[in-house]
Amino acid sequence: QACWLPPHLGLIWAFVGPMILIVLVDAVLLIISVVSLHCTKRKTAKLVLGRQPFIKLGMQLLKTVVILLPLFCFTWIIGLFAVAPEAQVFAYIFIVSNTLQGLFIFLLHVVRN
């Protein structure tokens, strides 16, 4: 009953609007990062290996996306779903995923390497 931004007044857009902008910027940064890493790996593979198999390069690209996706926009996409009044589960997932984001960074970039 006591929502800090009641949806019936349209004030929820004060939260959802910037969140959509964050998701879009994160998606663009993710695409730029993946394309940049893909081009760098492809050039390195041509210099070192001559011709790297396309499937192996594709698997490395998929692995990069899986690693970067939680860091860039996974939590904010869940946050967009959490705005609906009947989406209490998404609110909890959003809170937990934001809380664990530092742990994801540690595990995926420090422990993994």
Image: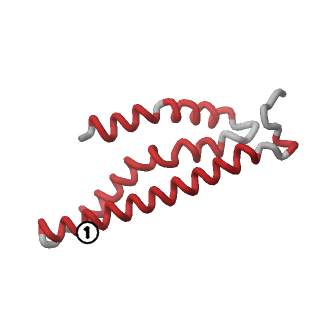
Residue 45 image offset from top left, x and y in percent:
18, 66
Residue 81 image offset from top left, x and y in percent:
65, 44
Residue 6 image offset from top left, x and y in percent:
82, 37
Per the image, the residue denoted by label 1 is 54
Identify the residue at image location x=76%, y=37%.
85
58 w.r.t. 107: above or below: below
Indicate the quadrant where residue 79 lies: top right
In-image side of 82 versus 3 (left or right): left
Indicate the quadrant where residue 70 lies: top left
In-image side of 21 versus 107 (left or right): right
Q: Residue furthest top?
A: 2
In-image side of 68 versus 77 (left or right): left
**Residue kind at label 1, given as amino acid type:** Phe
Residue 63 image offset from top left, x and y in percent:
33, 52
Identify the residue at image location x=43%, y=62%.
32
The quadrant of the image that shows the C terminus is top left
Q: Secondary structure at mark 1?
A: helix
- Of 86 and 60, nearer the camera is 60
User: What colour scheme has been applied to the protein in the rendered image?
Assistant: secondary structure
